[in-house]
Image: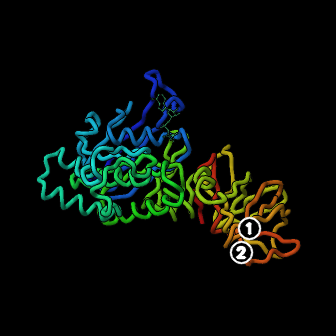
Amino acid sequence: MARITLDHIRHAYSAKAKAAGDYALKEVHYEWEDGGAYALLGPSGCGKTTLLNIISGLLHPSDGRILFDGKDVTTLSTEARNIAQVFQFPVVYDTMTVFDNLAFPLRNRHVPEAEVRSRVTHILEMTDLASMANRRAQGLTADQKQKISLGRGLVRSDVNAILFDEPLTVIDPHMKWQLRSQLKRLHRSSRFTMVYVTHDQTEALTFADKVVVMHDGQIVQIGTPAELFERPSHTFVGYFIGSPGMNVMPVTVEGALARIGEQAIALSGVPKLARGAKLELGIRPEFVRLGRDGMAIDIGKVEDIGRQKIVRASFCGQPLSIVLAEDDEIPADARVTFDPAAIGIFADSWRVGMEG
Ligand code: ATP
């Protein structure tokens, strides 16, 4: 297992790249802890696979260095980096038994047979495959095959990291939940450094200790699920994480007040602003209070989603979502208040600090 340092890394697929926009991966400078579980989360095309391939060695970055436990591995192959990878589609040897599939990476490295038996038996139990150890892989379902791929990633004790590239894509929705929780348990018991690529926030938030949110070739925030929810650093994190996402509306700011239309909204302090930036106020739907007092809104529709309901409203001409508990009343002539502690002010999409 290893601590992974991304030292001023960036990557362009064209050798002629000059401007920041030419880079599929803009500069990343960060250290990932040994034994951490990280998810790379973002929409299609944001650079997740590019970053994963740079870590695995499939791709050499245009600039910067990558270090494992302080050792420069930038020019080393995947094999030399000692990385296990699990891809979207299971890679299994159909003619081999489940046991032999799992034993393959160990036997390949001439691990003594007694140790092969003990490690494979352990992995068979962890992945719930023990009952089919002696069956050929041919004819197994897609999720059983993907469990073999996951198991093969976990069976070696000497890997520096395990990288997962959307590993649950081919899995049935009802099995996804089970495999996701299993992976989390596997991480807890093995403490391998794991990096998991996904565009699905539920997968990222359940698997990872730290979620790396990517947008347009850039890491916009690295944080725990709670940090991403409570203090998004960028408006993209605000509306990508959460369902529905954060409400974001254009405002002007005067001291500790944000103004939108006729309304003045109290902030928890005075935002530290540079001149000329585009200013927005962000508040999560869970922190908008609905009652008889406060600012006027027009309620559009109310969506029932089980234990909660989502109120879709219009506030000063801007769409506003509000999340309520299923039995919360919606008063006639309902008005809203925003909890100042839950408000973020964003300048050119980035959260700004507050003074006072
Ligand atoms: P997806 O979820 O669709 O795989 P991603 O977030 O993994 O997307 P990347 O595959 O890393 O994103 O792609 C980032 C950008 O780099 C995209 O604009 C993509 O078109 C571009 N790109 C990726 N691979 C290549 C390549 N081999 N040559 C040129 N451009 C590429």
Q: Amino acid at mark 2?
A: Glu
Q: Quadrant of residue 181?
A: bottom left
Q: Residue drawn 13% across and 47% down? A: 110
For the view shown, which residue lies furthest in the top direction? 16
- Colour approach in the figure: rainbow
Say which of 60 and 129 sits in front.
129
Secondary structure of the residue carrying tag 2 is loop
Is residue 302 toward the left or the right of residue 150 in the image? Answer: right
Secondary structure of the residue carrying tag 1 is strand
Q: Amino acid at mark 1?
A: Asp
Q: Residue drawn 61% across and 60% down? A: 242
Say which of 35 and 290 sits in front.
35
Q: Earlier in the sequence, mark 2 or mark 1?
A: 1
Q: Residue drawn 69% across and 60% down? A: 255
Mark 2 burial class by Cα count in 10 Å: few <14, some 14-19, many 20+: few
Is residue 32 toward the left or the right of residue 354 in the image? Answer: left
Q: Quadrant of the N terminus?
A: bottom left
Q: Quickly name the residue at label 1.
A: 304
Q: How many marks?
A: 2
Q: Quadrant of residue 60?
A: top left
Residues at badges 2 and 1 in contact (C-beta under 8 Å)?
yes
Q: Quadrant of residue 189?
A: bottom left
The tag on residue 326 is: 2
Q: Residue drawn 67% across and 59% down? A: 244
| Residue 47 seen anywhere in this rendered image of the structure | yes
- Residue 73 image point, x, y percent: 26, 39
- Residue 225 image point, x, y percent: 50, 62
Q: Quadrant of the C terminus?
A: bottom right
| Residue 187 seen anywhere in this rendered image of the structure | no
Q: Is mark 2 within 8 Å of ligand 1?
A: no
- Residue 75 image point, x, y percent: 27, 33
The tag on residue 344 is: none
